[in-house]
Image (tube, rainbow, N blue to C red):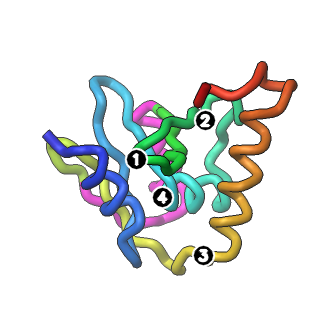
Amino acid sequence: MVTMVSKLALSSEPGWGVAFRNGASIEVYQQSLFWLLSKGMPCDMRDITLSDLLGSVVVVCQFSLQKLVEFLDFNEIPYFLEDDRVRWLLPSNISNIYYIQWKKHTIELNNSELYGGSVLN
């Protein structure tokens, strides 16, 4: 079993995106999620959840495996299906500045009254 710390490390590996299988769905974390969303992967912001790991906010979203594979195929992104994860090559690296801005905005939206307050309380 892959630990949360391992998932976060793999999610931020330069040049790669990764999603972890969780039954019939997949979980996408942090930078990998940002990259998918910035490339047009459809997602309702209310499907994005936040959790706390050692004082750091973790951003995660679940998709169906089929939805991810169709998105990668449509965008002609090479990917690899493994037993516990899906990995894909990033045609361009993730901008740390844009990622940090997106994460901050995502946390603010999650904490706003619009979404019923923080899930971190």
- Separation of marks 4 and 3 at Cα, in angstroms: 12 Å
- Separation of marks 3 and 1 at Cα, in angstroms: 21 Å
Q: Amino acid at mark 4?
A: Ser
Q: Amino acid at mark 2?
A: Ile
Left or right, 117 with reference to 3: right
Q: Are marks 4 and 3 in contact (CB under 8 Å)?
A: no
Q: Which one is in front, 72 or 92? A: 92
For the magenta stretch, what is the residue range?
A: 64-80
**Residue depicted at x 48% and y 58%:** 32
Please report whichever mark, 1 or 4, sits nearer to the chain's N-terminal start: 4
Q: Amino acid at mark 3?
A: Asn
Magenta residue check for 67: yes
Q: Residue furthest right?
A: 114
Q: Residues within 10 Å of mark 3 (few under 14, many from 20)?
A: few
Task: Note whether 121 is above or below 9 in the view shown.
Answer: above
Please report whichever mark, 2 or 3, sits nearer to the chain's N-terminal start: 2
Identify the mark at residue 54; answer none if there is no mark. 1
